[in-house]
Image: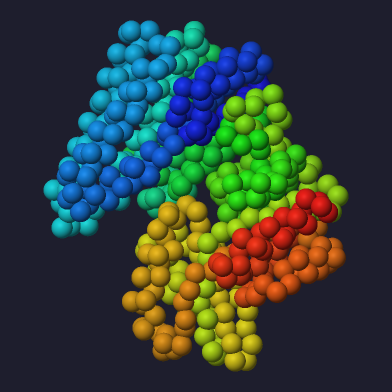
Amino acid sequence: MDTLIMKFGGTSVGMTTGLTQLLSIVIYEVERWDRLLLVVSALEGVTDALIEAAHLAQLANRRGYRRIVTTLRTRHLALIENLPLGTVERSALQADIDRLLFDMLDLCQSLADHHDQQAKPEAIDAIIGVGERLAARIVAALLRQNNLRGVAIDATDLIITDNVYGNATPNLELTRERITTHLTPMLERKIIPVITGFIGSTVAGKPTTLGRGGSDYTASVLGVCIDADEVWIWTDVDGIMTTDPREVSTATVIPTLSYEEVAELAYFGARILHARMIGPLRERQIPLRVRNVFKPQATGTLVNEQAENSKPALKAVTSIQGLGLMAPRGGPLHPIAALVDEALFKVSGTHTEVMISSQSSSHSFVCFVISTSAGHDALHNIQVELEERLPTLPDGDQWTMFPATIITVIGTQVDSLHRLLASILTALDGIRILGMAQGRCSLSLVVEPRSSERAIRQIHDLVINNG
């Protein structure tokens, strides 16, 4: 049976125009596929507000988190009022929203009551996952109002993860068992599940979250476990772009990318996709499409295996925050790498996956990627943590710490066509390069933050003119 999974982001579900587009897309696609599943994110900005509420609760700032709950209630109810819902459906939906927010208020109250003790991480994940639960119920109600059998499903009943709260990893085997038991019978009855992205639970049933942007990851995991034919990500841009269009106005859509290329793009800063979502799809050869919810007639970007055989070209350039450390000495880098990994895990729950380094007999430089899933304050918090830890190293006083920017160029056969590398380095003439790392389809360069905008524009000109 043909199965399609469509994930809708916060801009799609956060306003009436986006929800109208979502509805028209579902009405069209439900006739073309045997089985249809939806994954939804929280309304845009809601997860950030929930993270702040959890933080305020830990500080016992009751006025602060209650204000946030009130604001969220007002926003969601205002959205419902503008939707074409019947009286019964609207009343039931309002009651659902009040119940979810009341339960969340209880969790915040519990954190506030025990603020002098260590907060339970599952309580924090339960709070910040409420946004998806609210959004799923709104979308399901809208489908039902239009004679579609939509049912909101909490992914805590489906996605089984480890206990790394804030950045959990799904257990595909256990998740597949849950899906077979709970989801497959619904699909056979032509029900359209509207599943919460971003959240899951441990085997013991404790709530977890999959990291920032984790709704993409949810769609990927569901796709693998349900044997989907395709996974579509609906967003507010025309597809995966040659660079961030908010920074460079000449950015254009990339028609096709390989799994490896898009994985590198996602990891090194392209915020349109969750970095960990590509692996499962690649393993099962499930095509991924990224499309604009406001331009459903456009084909967007197709990600599949065939794109790996495309002709050599530079395809995209992206950037991400990094933490640089420099010392006037050579020698082993393991102690400083281990220290940074410990600090990063304490602050964000993630380990260092990529380290870019350059060394000589009298100089050492290392740079660590700060993943977008680590949160907005991660770089500052890690610097504060390292300032306390560096003196514990024998040569800790020699290391200078500073923000850095990692510019990554994605292209086909970058590792073997050295003329492409030469053109990139020529374009950066006059810009100090602190370190470089080359992959099969990528070249990453560490530069000072003040040079990053110029570097991106120079390289993007190459992508557009020679891609």
Q: Nearer the viewer, residue 166 or 92?
A: 92
Q: Residue at x 27, y 19 (%)?
A: 95
For the question of whether residue 227 can be seen, the reply is no
Does 315 appear above or below 414?
above
Q: Quadrant of the N terminus?
A: top right
Q: Is residue 243 left or right of residue 226?
A: right
Q: Residue at x 29, y 28 (%)?
A: 74
- Most extreme residue toward the left, as rendered? 113
Residue 193 at what x, y percent from top left?
A: 48, 22
For the question of whether residue 312 can be seen, the reply is yes
Q: Residue at x 79, y 42 (%)?
A: 306
Res 35 quadrant in image: top right
Residue 76 at what x, y percent from top left?
A: 35, 27
Q: Is residue 166 left or right of residue 260?
A: left
Q: Nearer the viewer, residue 185 or 76?
A: 76
Res 332 quadrant in image: bottom right
Q: Residue at x 65, y 67 (%)?
A: 445
Does 348 appear above or below 337?
above
Does 349 appear above or below 295?
below
Q: How many marks?
A: 0
Residue 7 at what x, y percent from top left?
A: 54, 31
Residue 452 at what x, y percent from top left?
A: 61, 64
Res 288 quadrant in image: top right
Q: Is residue 99 left or right of residue 286?
A: left
| Colour treatment of the image | rainbow
Does 358 appear above or below 372?
below
